[in-house]
Amino acid sequence: AVHRLDKETSGVMVFALSEPVKEKLMNNWHKDVTERIYIAVAETPKNKRDYIEKEGTIDLPLAQNAYHLSYVPKTHDPSIKTENARTHYKILNSNSDYSIFELQLDTGRKNQIRAHLSYMKYTLAGDKNYHSKTNPFGRLCLHAKSLAFIHPVNGKEVKFEVGAPVEWYKLQKEKTSSAKS
């Protein structure tokens, strides 16, 4: 394996067929990756004043706590070591229970999506570490939809993509339909 996904995250992963290619991919990962897109199901905040725009960028630094979980510090404290993190998001569909996000990463920090969305009060469904209230699929609702990078041998961009679980969209439609009834 060349990179990692959070436990229970589904989707695209890269495996190298030789040690030299693996080393080259790993050493140039942040430079050679041109696109990382995720799909996530998050709990919609119950308070409407916590709703965010349908599309935007979360450009907030991340720190790690004693349990190695990433978080957005609430205040600027020079004693807290942080790393820049930027997540572009688009809400694909939303109802009073769940919001389906498409997320594109400019940076790939540990738990970046989970920490950024949690800070914005959109905790991923099934995310025990960030205190989700629901777990509709018995796992974290995060899926690596696509990954594009410069191939380490031929120098051309390659892109791999796999759709998110259809059950996620069905859940969204069921909740939307029941909310309209």
Image: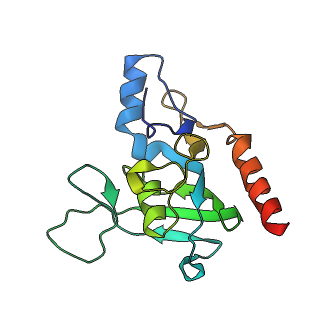
- Of the pair 28 and 12, the residue shown nearer to us: 12
Q: Quadrant of residue 93?
A: bottom right
Seen in the picture, residue 39 relative to 43 is either above or below; the reply is above
Q: Position of residue 15 (x, y in %)?
A: 49, 25
Q: How is the image coloured?
A: rainbow
Seen in the picture, residue 53 relative to 99 is either above or below; the reply is below
- Tally the marks: 0
Q: Residue at 56% of width from left, 37% of height from top?
A: 10
- In the rendered view, does 29 fall on the left or right side of 44? left
Seen in the picture, residue 35 relative to 179 is either above or below; the reply is above
Q: Residue at 20% of width from left, 62% of height from top?
A: 81
- Of the pair 85 and 153, the residue shown nearer to us: 85
Q: Residue furthest left?
A: 79
- Of the pair 111 and 157, the residue shown nearer to us: 111
Q: Residue at 50% of width from left, 60% of height from top?
A: 123
State the quadrant of the N terminus.
Answer: top left
- Of the pair 156 and 96, the residue shown nearer to us: 96
Q: Position of residue 23 (x, y in %)?
A: 35, 27
